[in-house]
Amino acid sequence: MRRLLLLVCAIVLVDTSFYAAITPLLPYYADHEHLTKTGAGILVGAYPAGTLVASLPAGWAAVRVGPRALLIAGLALLSASSVTFGLAQSIVLLDVARFAQGVGGALTWTGGMGWLSGLAPADRRGAMMGTAMAAATGGALLGPVLGAVARGVGPGVTFATVGLIALALLLMVILQPGRAPTGVEEGGSLRAAFRQPLIARGLWLVACTALCFGVINVLLPLRMDRFGASGALIAVVWLFGAALESVVNPLSGRYADRHGWAGVARFGLCAGAAVALVASVPQSVALLAVIGVASGPLIGVLWTPGLVLLGSGSDEARFDHTYAFALMNLAWAAAQTVATAGGGALAHATEDIVPYALVATVALITAATMTRPQAVRRTHPAVAREA
């Protein structure tokens, strides 16, 4: 179990490092490719768009061929798309490479996280999934550094190295004993999993997290650049934000194991709304940097209750866990695509405060309805230990 946890942590770390590398590179590509906010949003949103397209097929495939095969395919695609992104000389090829990496991410996250959640003991699932998310945020921490390195030494060498690391992980997955394919007789389905109350709540929390992060990760770096921040400073801001988030995730997982998910979710939703509402106000690089650093741990705590609910709902309905995590990819990708591409386009047409305010409203309404003690008990009394 420990070996699988470490392997899944390594895989999601590499995947999210490639995804997060775009943050300090965004002003660079905006200048060199003459991108508007809409174009920048499309470049960021190409990854979640790929994940959106591949999520349901990944869930279907994982149950039939097993998570190890899914991980092998995802890592192969990650390696190829990383090299392509590094060598790309046009915005179209950059968008295509990001899209392909999003498809690979759907495969690796469905296979890896579904595999880990299904084998984790129920009383330790929050801590183990929190640890996996800490590794993912470690990738978000490494990503800005990767982007800054790419600006310094060139994207070709930098992303070719990422591709080699993905190949090394692929070999480790091949050596990892695989779970036997469950076959079509396995209980549950993607449609039934979506209708399971705890899974549905977990999916919505994942979507809320993606909405908050998506809008901030597009608009805040551009605003910092507008008021004079360098690419290196933007990278440092996201580095510290992800570092704090990686500390918070395991702690929130242990708290959820002992006291329930509702309190953690309520805090993250309210904090995410607060960050979004103030992000468009400052014209000082220092204040914008503080907001960027704070966004990581304050919003990031939302990942853990979402993942805990997905695992608990799968246990309750006796579903294969890969169904829930395929739907998690779908929820994340849909929300991230709307937040990045849609948020960038809306900000370009109006002002930054408009998409920020919409995201904050969604978060506050969710906190007021989903985490109320009566709503938690009505959905499932056994998980309403703390509300």
Image (spheres, rainbow, N blue to C red):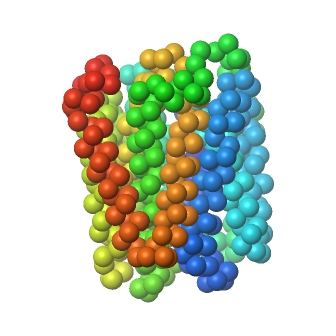
Q: Quadrant of residue 286?
A: bottom left
Q: Is residue 130 visible?
A: no
Q: Residue furthest bottom?
A: 228
Measured as percent of width and height from the top left, residue 175 is found at 73, 31
> Residue 58 vs residue 304: left or right?
right
Is residue 335 visible in the rendered structure shown here? yes
Farthest-out residue, top: 185
Point out residue 378 in the picture as x, y percentages from the top left corner.
28, 24
Count of numbered circles on the image: 0
Q: Identify which residue is drawn at 69% across, 56% down.
A: 99
In which quadrant of the rendered view does residue 337 lie?
bottom right
x then y, percent, for residue 81 = 74, 57
- Please identify the quadrant where the C terminus is shown: top left
Front-most of 18 and 267? 267
Q: Nearer the viewer, residue 346 or 134?
A: 346
Residue in the picture at 44% in, 33% down: 200
Query: Which residue is painted at 57% across and 42% down in the image?
Result: 330
Q: Is residue 74 left or right of residue 266?
A: right
The quadrant of the image that shows the N terminus is top right
- Is 326 placed left or right of 259 in the picture? right
Q: Is residue 71 above or below residue 236?
A: above
Q: Is residue 78 left or right of residue 210?
A: right
* Image coordinates for residue 83, horizontal then vertical, percent: 76, 61
In this view, 169 is above or below 378:
below
> Which residue is farthest front?
349
For the point 73% across and 60% down, the residue is: 97
